[in-house]
């Protein structure tokens, strides 16, 4: 909180979170008043969360390629406009069920656009060492709002109607828009044009697919989301059937979960300093298993509230740890897309889990479903022995910024391609096993950063000569590929240069030409020119 930019945006976001939850209560109540179908009432929640599933990756690509501050401002202004329309039509009595769903869906689209930009901007507001605490505060703020917001929304709807709840939500955006307008972050200069949306989304998927650390986080968060969704999905049934209570009991259980989440945020700092990332995640899994087991056996409101508090604390600890792990495992150029894929995995697992636990509770009973959930949590903790959480605190993923665009003798445009790269190494026979091991990692990094058709060749005439070869679609993509090299990646190149005998490895850069190309390309094909690096 000592970082002014983060503190101001966090407080304004807390206000916006309260407004969003108040709006959600008002929308659900209004739908119940104007629609006779229970399915239409249920669709209100779906219309809010579905955009996150659909547009999260695209929003992450936009956050990585454009000014994140401007993206957030646009998202907030868009949601403000939709909220104003919803408020006006509600006060005029013009809201129909499908208009209400449409407007809540559009507000959800604004949230989907805002999410990756806000989460990835945290790394721009605080230093890397404070990132875990900042992410945990974000989780705490949302859970605090979720604990109190619905109750406030219910009071507003009861006292002044759903239209007033919509108006409160519209006003709640103003503080965040004002703070974002005043925030002037220092941006690294961009020397390349933004990627197209399709290419950016593909690059994000490829990066995550080729990053073992992020794939491990996605696996663990999916298991956690699948199992933990049981307690929240069945909470109304727990309040009604297992505790034999009513709406007040349900509110108390929600409050217990939210209060535990806030407490978990406050103790997270001490736990992070005392435990490794993997041990913290295992404790969160086992703690939620305890929550599910206690809830399954308890008939006391107080005891079930205690169980919910344990679950809320473990919820914040686990999800904030997963979020931080993703951010620390991805360089800044792709962090928005990585967070978007993490969010998709987590929300997808929760949505699937809610449906699955509902079926199991209907068939076997809520207590049995909770026990199965507890068993899945124990299994999730055991997965850590095979797929341990990455600890990237000491890994430097800042761009290396040593590479410069080479001079070429053949005229070339950014869109020219394909570009073929050949790097020749001379490796002693005794160093071949280590060279091949390093090359396996080199292949993963090259492909992760956009290289295609990567191959390793050995000269049959001289067995000490090895050639690394790969393609990029265009010259511009070749430049992007090299500018994505991080300090951590550079260690691979440094070790390869140590193994190579005879100065620097020989690099050739070539462009593919087809016979029968346009006449303008013929002079290049007939009279090849060698550049300073020996390429033709």
Image (spheres, rainbow, N blue to C red):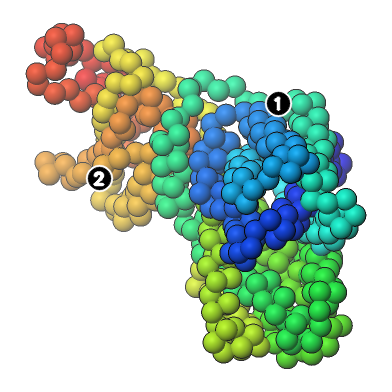
Lower sequence index among marks 2 and 1: 1
Q: Which residue was labeled with disc 2?
A: 456
Please, which residue is most extreme toward the right here? 159
Residue 355 in view of the camera: yes
Percent x, y of residue 531:
28, 15
**Could you say where residue 346 lies in the image, as x and y percent from the top left?**
57, 60
Quadrant location of the N terminus?
A: top right
Which of the pair 498/60 is nearer the observer?
60
Q: What element carries label 1?
A: loop
Label 2 to label 1: alpha-carbon separation: 41 Å
- Residue at 74% x, 87% y is 242
* Tag 2 secondary structure: strand
* Mark 1 crowdedness (10 Å alpha carbons): few <14, some 14-19, many ≥20: few
Residue 3 in view of the camera: no
**Whole-percent x and y of residue 505?**
33, 33
Q: Tell which of 433 and 1 is nearer to you.
A: 1
Q: Residue 186 carries which label?
A: 1
Where is residue 487 drawn, in percent x and y? 54, 39
Which residue is more in the foreground, 358 or 383?
Answer: 358
Foreground tag (2 vs 1): 1
Indicate whether 193 appears above or below 420: above
**In the rendered image, which quarter is residue 514 located in?**
top left
Q: Which residue is drawn at 53% across and 61% down?
A: 348
Number of numbered markers: 2
Q: Are marks 2 and 1 in contact (CB under 8 Å)?
A: no
Q: Residue at x 66, y 34 (%)?
A: 78
Q: In which quadrant of the rendered view does residue 74 lie?
A: top right
């Amino acid at each position: 909180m000592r970082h002014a930019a983060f503190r101001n945006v966090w407080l304004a976001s807390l206000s916006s979170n309260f407004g969003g939850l108040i709006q959600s209560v008002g929308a659900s109540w209004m739908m119940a008043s104007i629609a006779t179908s229970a399915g239409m009432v249920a669709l209100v929640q779906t219309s809010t969360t579905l955009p996150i599933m659909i547009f999260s990756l695209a929003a992450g690509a936009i956050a990585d390629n454009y000014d994140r501050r401007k993206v957030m401002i646009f998202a907030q202004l868009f949601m403000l406009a939709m909220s104003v329309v919803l408020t006006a039509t509600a006060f005029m009595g013009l809201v129909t069920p499908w208009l209400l769903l449409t407007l809540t869906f559009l507000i959800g689209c604004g949230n989907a656009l805002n999410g990756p930009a806000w989460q990835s901007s945290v790394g721009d507001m605080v230093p890397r060492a404070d990132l875990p605490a900042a992410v945990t505060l974000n989780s705490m703020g949302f859970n605090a709002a979720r604990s109190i917001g619905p109750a406030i929304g219910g009071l507003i709807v009861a006292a002044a109607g759903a239209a007033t709840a919509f108006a409160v939500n519209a006003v709640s955006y103003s503080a965040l828009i004002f703070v974002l307008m005043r925030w002037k972050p220092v941006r690294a200069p961009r020397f390349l044009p933004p990627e197209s949306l399709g290419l950016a989304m593909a690059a994000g998927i490829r990066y995550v697919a080729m990053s073992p650390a992020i794939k491990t986080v996605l696996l663990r968060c999916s298991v956690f989301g699948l199992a933990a969704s049981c307690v929240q999905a069945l909470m109304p049934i727990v309040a009604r059937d297992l505790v034999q209570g009513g709406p007040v009991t349900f509110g108390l259980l929600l409050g217990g979960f939210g209060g535990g989440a806030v407490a978990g945020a406050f103790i997270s700092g001490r736990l992070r300093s005392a435990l490794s990332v993997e041990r913290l995640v295992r404790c969160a899994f086992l703690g939620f298993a305890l929550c599910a087991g206690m809830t399954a056996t308890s008939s006391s409101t107080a005891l079930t509230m205690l169980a919910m508090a344990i679950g809320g604390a473990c919820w914040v600890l686990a999800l904030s740890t997963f979020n931080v792990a993703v951010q620390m495992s991805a360089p800044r150029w792709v962090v928005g897309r990585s967070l978007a894929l993490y969010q998709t995995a987590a929300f997808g697992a929760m949505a699937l889990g809610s449906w699955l636990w509902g079926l199991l509770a209907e068939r076997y009973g809520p207590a049995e479903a909770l026990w199965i959930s507890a068993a899945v949590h124990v299994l999730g903790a055991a997965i850590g022995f095979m797929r341990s959480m990455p600890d990237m605190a000491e890994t430097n993923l800042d761009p290396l910024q040593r590479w410069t665009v080479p001079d070429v003798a053949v005229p070339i445009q950014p869109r020219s391609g394909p570009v073929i790269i050949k790097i020749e190494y001379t490796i002693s026979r005794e160093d071949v096993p280590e060279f091949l091991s390093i090359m396996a990692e080199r292949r993963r990094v090259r492909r992760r950063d956009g290289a295609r058709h990567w191959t390793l060749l050995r000269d049959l005439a001289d067995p000490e000569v090895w050639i690394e070869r790969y393609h990029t679609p265009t010259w511009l993509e070749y430049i992007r590929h090299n500018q994505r090299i991080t300090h951590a990646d550079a260690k691979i190149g440094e070790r390869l240069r140590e193994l190579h005998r005879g100065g620097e490895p020989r690099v050739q850069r070539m462009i593919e030409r087809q016979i029968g190309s346009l006449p303008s390309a013929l002079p290049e094909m007939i009279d090849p020119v060698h550049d300073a690096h020996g390429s033709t």
